[in-house]
Amino acid sequence: MNEMIISEIDEKSKFNFDFKEYKSIIYTVIFYSIGLFLGSYFYKEASSESLNKLIQPQEHSLLYLFSSNLCVYFSLFVVVVFLGFCLIGYPLINIVPALIGIETGIKCAYFFTNYSIKGIGYALIMIVPFIALFLTVIAFTIKISTDMSKNLVNMAKNGADTNGMDLKPYLKKYLILGLSMILASLANAGISTLLFSVVTI
């Protein structure tokens, strides 16, 4: 009998979810979803020939796509890292996933509106997987930056010297995530270059 009770407790403990531990990641998903809605709504209201020309996919070289990804997503990564070093960083940090959501929402709305089923297929193959990859890296970067920014705030409130904070664990994680962002950008560029000749719209 005791063994049954213990096993039931063990089973329940497996499904325990620590909201505080993953709060920043949950907020990232929420703000990204809000951005998706705003982006699709913006496209619906501001749709024009000029906007369509900006969004319309064009075949480019591997180097162009790689540098383009780095300019956009690595810049956002740097912004998230910078906000981690700011006392007011964590209240502002969720603007980043919202911006990614807006961009994704505009692109997806363009394909859904102009190409129907074919556009949905294109978005699922050429946009969604890579945005999910980039967003995952950004989400974990936001978690680290949020923790660091909150620690800085707590130290400042307690009158502690923020210069004495050990930054090595944070910097190591940032380095890993930064390399992940570069590799994701390269993978995106490489696969997109290959798929451009296969997937047409």
Image (cartoon, grey):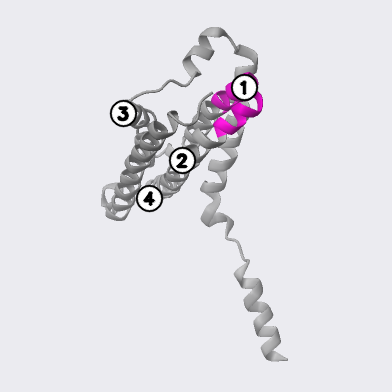
- Whether the magenta-drawn stretch holds residue 60 is answered as no
Extreme-front residue of the structure? 198
Look at the numbered disc 4 and give the secondary structure of its residue: helix
Q: Earlier in the sequence, mark 4 or mark 1?
A: 1
Which quadrant holds residue 101?
A: top right
Callout 3: helix, strand or loop?
helix
Give the residue pinned by disc 4.
155
Q: Residues within 10 Å of mark 3 (few under 14, many from 20)?
A: some
Q: Which residue is mark 1?
A: 115
Majority secondary structure of magenta residues: helix
CA–CA distance between discs 1 and 2?
Answer: 39 Å
Q: Which quadrant of the rendered structure holds the N terminus?
A: bottom right
Type of the residue with mark 4: Met
Q: Circle 3 is placed at which residue position?
A: 67
**Relative to 132, is 144 on the left or the right?**
left
Task: Tell me which segment is drawn in magenta.
Answer: 105-123
User: Which of 108/157 is in front?
Assistant: 108
Q: Which residue is rendered at x = 61% and y = 28% of the image?
A: 118
- Residue 62, position as x, y percentages in the image: 32, 30
